[in-house]
Image (cartoon, helix red, strand yellow):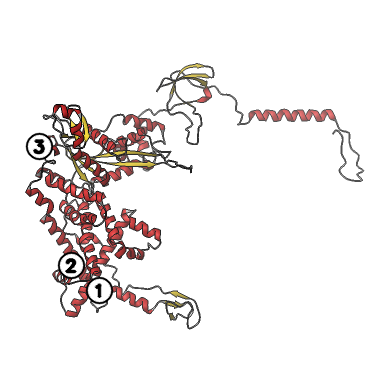
Amino acid sequence: MKRNVRTKLDCTNQFRPTDIQKMEAEIADRDKAYKKNWENQNRHPKSMQHEFKINDKVLFKNREMNKWSTPYEKEHYIVTEVLGSSIKAQRKSDGRIIYRDASKFKLLHEPNDDRWRQQLLSTPDRRYLQLEVCDTISKWLADEASTPVEFPKGLVRTVFDNEQVIGKTYRIKADSKVPTSIVTSHLYICIDPESTIQNDEKFAPSNWLFDKPNDHQKALFLSEDENCVNVFRVTRNNLISRCLVSVELEHSNGSFDFIDSVLSRKACREKVCLHCGAENEFTGRKCTNCKGPLVHECQNFSDIYDKKNNLNPYSFFSSIETETHNFSVKTGEPDLCNPGSFENVAEILTNVSERAGITNDRESGRKWLFLECDGGIYSIVDKLIFNVYHCTQCDEGFYGYDNFLEHRCSILHNIQPQHQYGWLVPLPGLLHIEMNACKAFFEITWDVVLKDFCMKLGYNSPKALDYAKSCGDHHKSWKILEIFYLAAADELLVPYVRECKISNIEPSVEGYWLWASDIEDPNYMFIQQMVFTYLHSMILFRVGCRRGNAVAIVAGREKMSHLFFARNHPRYQRIISQSRYIEVMMPDELKDIVKSSLTLSRTGNTGHYQGGDACLEEINKEAKCWISPKGIPSDKEWLRVFRNLDNLMTVCYF
């Protein structure tokens, strides 16, 4: 429209005529200026000349497939020809040649010296960063992990266990599977690097393990070591003696102890009125005096409770001495399989024998090896040791003696059978023995006393009680047992102390056992046996492990192993019996080695010893800190982490 429009009614203003040519010229100028600014905007930059040269290392832009796709490919290319904006590049790994525009490439920057790597790895938070943060470091660590971990020389005990990473899936459908990655990690414990006892064939299990036990060995298998029995009784009497002192002190003012005083005070004053302060019964909702609201009064027991009371359950074991061990620990070469079947465990044992250099040559090479593992793997290893026979003619193994006799070589050549894994001395993991003994103790005493005890500790809901009973967290379950150990020991001595007060007799340990021999109450006898025998043996076992005392370990294990036979625990029933049989059949020189190297400390601090399986659990936890959080780790990533783990942790703790 090319005319002025009147915007008001009865407008008398005179309108000036419009200059159409001038208006069109102004519109053209504004349009030209707008297009000029459009060209100069940042979202439309001018093309720039690339700086790629021949023999440059470049990264090629990756095609985005999903949200986990990286911006550029991991493998770099080398520029072979430059034609204007077109680049010809060849991949180094497989020789692939591509022609692309220069905008599809990025120059690869590499460090010039090792100081950059050392500075980056020595940052305080480097331990909790994953290896995929920097692609250059990942490639450098992959180069460092190109060679397998060397098996140490001398007297060695190896430990292995499985480690797994479970992936996440957000698809819900029938028969869907969760991606997992499982690896078998190894730990090498060098007991004596100068020892050559493992090169001596006479100590190989094939020369003593499969023999028929004599009468002396049968007697040892069915009897208990007197030294271990004495250690158990001395520590138990020390517990009772100290508990008698505390219980007698609580009854110094009469026949009421601390618990009776608390209950009597709670019974006298249950609820208090907020308005008038009058005392009311527990069942009341309003004050009987002023009809005001009622609240529970905050009780103060400082006058009847001694805050300086020693509640440490390990203070009763002062007679257990702390031994000193100096064993070197090394992360071993992992196996990329799950040790959950006979075939995989047999493959792992074959790999271990090859790495350790176990040969049939009578002149040189290692002839046997110690092996420590958890209960599930131990049961498989035990069956393989006693049931797999090797044919020297066809170099094959057969499970079962009948299968060996039926194969062709045995029929034609009358070959004598040999145990294929006769070079192996199995040892059960101490941590897993303790964990399963804890579960057995909970199962036996749950309905009798532990269920009510856990409810007093705050496990009130059905799910919380099921969680406590299942021992899902061993640390929490052990803390519950420590509290129950101290509380039940005092309560078991209260009737005896009260009777001594009435009869004016001085309480003593000998007097308590004489008094307890006349008790006929089945409940008291059951709790007394569970606390003073089995729970005390579990605490003694833990003290022996932490202090590196082999006598305390054996003394606690012999007593608490009875828990496995009270309920249905067939796996650990066989493990305890079989390990005891191997110890009896073992030569005296090997018995001394096993007792002196049951526990070790990675940090070198005395009093912080633990079993080899517990050390391997710590190593597996540290290895997961270096695993990429994106999906599940590949086999190459497992190898890269475990082969570099010792060096990475050394840099981390530097």
Q: Position of residue 529 (x, y in %)?
A: 21, 64
State the SS at label 2: helix
* Cα–Cα gap, marks 3 and 2: 49 Å
Q: Counting other residues with Cα less than 10 Å from the Cα at mark 1, is it few (<14), some (14-19), or many (20 or more)? A: some
Residue drawn 52% across and 21% down? 100
- The label nearer to you, 3 versus 2, is 3
Q: Amino acid at mark 3?
A: Lys
Q: Secondary structure at mark 3?
A: helix
* Residue 465, quarter of the rendered image: bottom left
Residue picked out by circle 1? 250
Q: Does residue 616 show up?
A: yes
Towards the viewer: 303 or 469: 469
Residue tagged by mark 2? 241
Instruction: Identify the residue at image location x=42%, y=26%.
Output: 75
Q: Are marks 3 and 1 in contact (CB under 8 Å)?
A: no
Label located before the other in sequence (1 or 2): 2
Query: Image height check: is 35 above or below 15?
Result: above
- Quarter of the image with the N terminus is top right
**Residue 654: in sight, yes or no?**
no
The residue under the point 37% across, 58% down is 466
Residue 228 point in image, percent of width and height: 13, 56
Work out whether 331 lies above or below 111. below
Mark 1 residue type: Glu
**What is the quadrant of the C terminus in the image?**
top left
Q: CA distance from mark 3 to mark 1?
A: 62 Å
> On the image, numbered disc 3 is attached to which residue?
202
Name the residue type under label 2: Ser
Q: Depth check: give the residue in front, 330 or 187.
A: 187
